[in-house]
Image (cartoon, coloured by chain):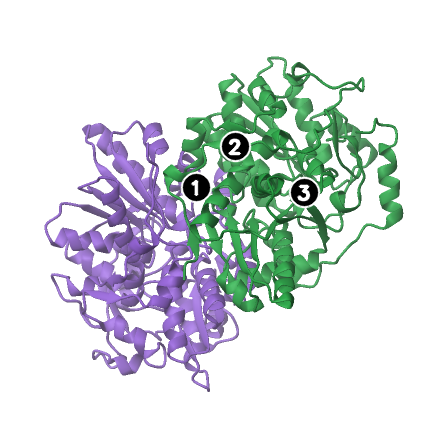
Chain colours: A purple, B green
Amino acid sequence: MRTKILLNEDEIPRQWYNLAADLPTPMAPPLGPDGKPISPEMLAPVFPMNLIEQEVSQERWIDIPEEVLQLLYRWRPAPLVRAHALEKALGTPARIYYKNESVSPAGSHKPNTAIPQAWYNKEFGIKKLTTETGAGQWGSALSFAGALIGLEIKVYMVRISFDQKPFRKVMMETWGGKCIPSPSNQTQAGRDVLAKDPDTPGSLGIAISEAIEEAVTDPKGETRYALGSVLNHVMLHQTIIGLEAKKQLEKAGEKNVDVVIGCAGGGSNFAGLSFPFIHDKINGADIDIIAVEPASCPTMTRAPFAYDHGDVAKMTPLLPMHSLGHTFVPAPIHAGGLRYHGIAPLVSAAINDNLIRAESLHQLECYQAAVTFARTEGIIIAPETSHAVASAIREANKAKDEGAEKVIVFNLSGHGLMDLLGYQKFFAGELHDYAMPEEELQKTVAQLADYPKP
Amino acid sequence: MRTKILLNEDEIPRQWYNLAADLPTPMAPPLGPDGKPISPEMLAPVFPMNLIEQEVSQERWIDIPEEVLQLLYRWRPAPLVRAHALEKALGTPARIYYKNESVSPAGSHKPNTAIPQAWYNKEFGIKKLTTETGAGQWGSALSFAGALIGLEIKVYMVRISFDQKPFRKVMMETWGGKCIPSPSNQTQAGRDVLAKDPDTPGSLGIAISEAIEEAVTDPKGETRYALGSVLNHVMLHQTIIGLEAKKQLEKAGEKNVDVVIGCAGGGSNFAGLSFPFIHDKINGADIDIIAVEPASCPTMTRAPFAYDHGDVAKMTPLLPMHSLGHTFVPAPIHAGGLRYHGIAPLVSAAINDNLIRAESLHQLECYQAAVTFARTEGIIIAPETSHAVASAIREANKAKDEGAEKVIVFNLSGHGLMDLLGYQKFFAGELHDYAMPEEELQKTVAQLADYPKP
């Protein structure tokens, strides 16, 4: 009974897959403050040009630099695991596989893009990167990458998560990164928010504003900003997950995959697993691809497709995406990494082209799924990941009802060892479900009315 | 440049190695309350007979049951990693390798014995296991094993660690285990200690007494006790580490190993890596094998070899081991897993036969080594593990001074993601070194005077 499907060093994918090259409907361009498509040069104060080139690339396959591969190889290829014990507990005829991205030293899929982003910045002569983090996975991953590659890292962490997870800061510091709660008084964007609402839990949108502000105001020009999700080049770097998974499924003797599942906040772990399968779907494969979000932050399932900023202070270009509006502050649920007002333009485009479907779940069902998973498969997963597991359990139960031997693959995006407060509250009965009322939804999306339509 | 050396599923060792079969000087037997060697039957209220047979076995090789292998295979074989980045940072000609045991779902090497112990108990018809835990690694591992195999788990956690690491309890609970601080008022042993010293930080010796008491007083006889270190069968189960490492070193093209290092509290991770190399040493290989302990708990370097109990309430037999005396309560350093008054009889025997040497290090040097390791190799290690890393750095610097291309292998016994409070205090300058004064040592070992001599 084979549980773990591994790849050898020489089987690691050597190119990333760019979904932009294959989308049936070309993506709307990002727009500048003047409402006109932005040029690569306009992004130069924020990102190094080598990453901007990836951001706008229409090439289907992009080479992974050899030095990046060497660093990724410290924990990759990540295992694909057959969830025999979970299947047995559910009594499902489905074969469930998960890609275990929790094996990275930072504990999630985030280093897959942190390493190349740090590397390209270093190549370009940059000395320091600023960034935001929600649950802390991304800030940890970038601090990890900064240590390995030799860059100074400064992380603005959403205050609610900073308070809930005090040891994330220590983790980043151990790798040499600096971490402060956002909103902070170190930036104009932060001070503006604090002036209006000193007790705000913060949001990824606010933290992004602060990080970008610090990067673009460096008088020496040696600082850039790094984003852990949403952007095209981030999705690109994560596709190594799905490319490995496809090779591993082949090794496991699986000819067809029926269902592919990932949780989605900004969209990066979902994209990482699913985009290579979307490639197959575009070429005729029959795959149900599901992006799962929390009901309390229903970007994909209920928000309009619109032009919106990626951050509160409107420092980013207008991006074509499903969005609840850049000023939206999500309810403080424990899946901090899923608390984002928008979703990656590439994921939005895939939704619009009916290549994937979105699903929203409540947190109690997700925590229950996480506990089931821990007691069968043995891994304590991140609250974000629990959304993918809950969805996989739904699909496995559906397969049971149908008596169908489906193949279900989901992304185990990270472990939950830094997120045990959420489990503690779940066991204590202190967590509750929350669905956004329709009036609240209408009120927040009203802010999108004045922007151009994609 | 090859970093990670993996083994395939079919290369996993299928037998454990029993050092007892090869010791030049036969071990002294454990003694009962009457001062006479105990019989296997006398241990029957504490352990199931199938594990007692392993405890007293003189067979060199013992088969690993197929079902145990299947469970171990969830994360094993564990990677052997060449520490290129650390070597570069040190400028050493030495080639440093580490066996990465932090990849288990519980985060340490402890599941290597938790899984077989739970499995043998289940086979024997046992329903519940009690145990103690120091830093929390063992209690987590046994809870993990209990979930996978279907046993109720109850963990007595040393109070100082329980307070320092509140999320360890949540981790165990997520796997379905129960965890309470020790000393507790749930056992006579606990109540006795609390009556004398209500503010005691606790110790492994006290927690062991409580766990054994709960096991042997189960009126249904369905409860047994599981120990995470010290005993022969625990050392046996851990030898899979060194057996894998030897195959991996061969794959890496290393014909000789010069130095083998592990940290040692009760001795299990050290034994796991080193015993298969001791086998080679007994057969003529020239290997320097180092067991590293904290200077604040100098069991191997300064305590006498004596008969002593494994626990405070004298519920265990008298074991022949280096011991500071079973009532000794070590200073509350952060490497909770190394705070034990004794050391495994098999490790003690290897010291007495000059097969290994012991070294004691201070905690500040160890934390500094851990930070160096995180910023080069990228892994945040447990405070226990930092003792092995600090020793490896010493050996690598020695090799640099000598211009010698030595091969150094150490055991990365666990990650430190649950131990970040220690790092936080280290960065804040709140940690201090502590060496036990000679008078204190003499005072505590005086309690051994009345026991028989091994």
- Counting residues from the N terminus, which is met first, the one under dot 3 or under dot 2? 2
Q: Which chain carries label 1?
A: B
Where is residue B361 shown, x and y percent of the image?
71, 54
Where is residue B3 shown, x and y percent of the image?
43, 57
At label 2, the amino acid type is Trp
In the rendered image, which quarter is residue B73 located in?
Answer: top left
What residue is pinned by disc 3? B355
Q: Tell me the number on the disc at residue B16.
A: 2
Residue under disc 2 on the same chain as residue under disc 1: yes
Of circles 3 and 1, the one toward us is: 3
Residue under disc 3 on the same chain as residue under disc 2: yes
Q: Which chain carries label 2?
A: B
Q: In which quarter of the image is the N terminus of chain B?
A: bottom left
Q: What element carries label 2?
A: strand
**Residue located at (52% from left, 52% from top):** B98
Residue A254 shown left or right of residue B58 in the figure: left
**Residue located at (30% from left, 27% from top):** A91
Q: Spatial distance from mark 3 to mark 2, Cα to Cα? A: 20 Å
For residue B213, above or below residue A405:
above
For residue B309, above or below residue B297:
above
What residue is pinned by disc 1? B75
For this rendering, which residue is in front, B364 or A91? Answer: B364
- Counting residues from the N terminus, which is met first, the one under dot 3 or under dot 1? 1
At label 1, the amino acid type is Trp
Q: Is mark 3 on a helix, strand or loop?
A: loop
Of circles 2 and 1, the one toward us is: 2
